[in-house]
Amino acid sequence: MRLWTLHPSYLDARGLVALWRKALLAQAGLGRTTGGYQHHPQLARFRATPSPAAAIAAYLREVHAEADRRGYRFNAQLIGHFGPVEQIPVSEGQLNIEWLHLKEKLEARDPTWLKQFLGVVRPDPHPLFVIVPGEKEWWERASPGNQE
């Protein structure tokens, strides 16, 4: 499972749909309504917040907003209840490794989509995250060249 630190605008159609599905599964895992993703390492950053349910809902809201901008019809009623949330710190190294990982995926899957981002050196993060100095996060398993 990958819950991108990158802003969802960088994802191609296939990636955005996959993110929506995985984030909904993560929401269920954080709410303990399913056994599938309850212990996934990427959920640690959501669990570390005062309200994990509100944090994943905020994450999903932005994915939904990106889908709306593209004219997709994702069901917003699937997003759990939310309230105010603070940004979650994520390291610059994590953002960088995800950017390399996504570019590799897009190179193989949708090079036309990738072309619009060739000049991007430092991509924008999902608005839930604030980028801080540091190497990749401890929960990161993928590395460039290692497709997940």
Image (cartoon, rainbow, N blue to C red):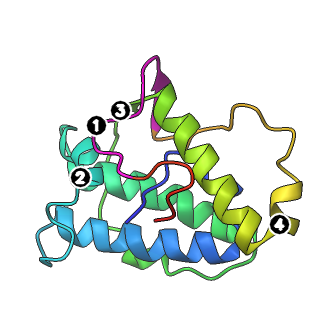
Which mark is first along the chain, 2 or 3? 2
Q: Which residues are magenta?
A: 129-141
* Residue designated by label 3: 86
Q: Residue furthest top?
A: 133
Which mark is first along the chain, 4 or 3? 3
Contact between marks 1 and 3 (CB within 8 A): the answer is no
Contact between marks 2 and 1 (CB within 8 A): the answer is yes
Q: Main secondary structure of the magenta part?
A: loop
The alpha-carbon separation of the residues under discs 3 and 4 comes to: 35 Å
Name the amino acid, label 1.
Answer: Trp
In percent of width and height, residue 71 lies at 75, 77
In percent of width and height, residue 7 lies at 61, 48
Within 10 Å of disc 2 (Cα), the crowding (few <14, some 14-19, many 20+) is some
Name the amino acid, label 4.
Answer: Pro
Which mark is first along the chain, 2 or 4? 2
Which part of the image, by quadrant, shows the N terminus? Answer: bottom left
Q: Residue at x 45, y 61 (%)?
A: 60
The alpha-carbon separation of the residues under discs 4 and 1 comes to: 30 Å
* Residue designated by label 2: 41
Q: Which mark is residue 138?
A: 1
The alpha-carbon separation of the residues under discs 4 and 2 comes to: 30 Å
Q: Which mark is residue 1?
A: none
45 left or right of 120 in image: left
Which mark is first along the chain, 1 or 4? 4
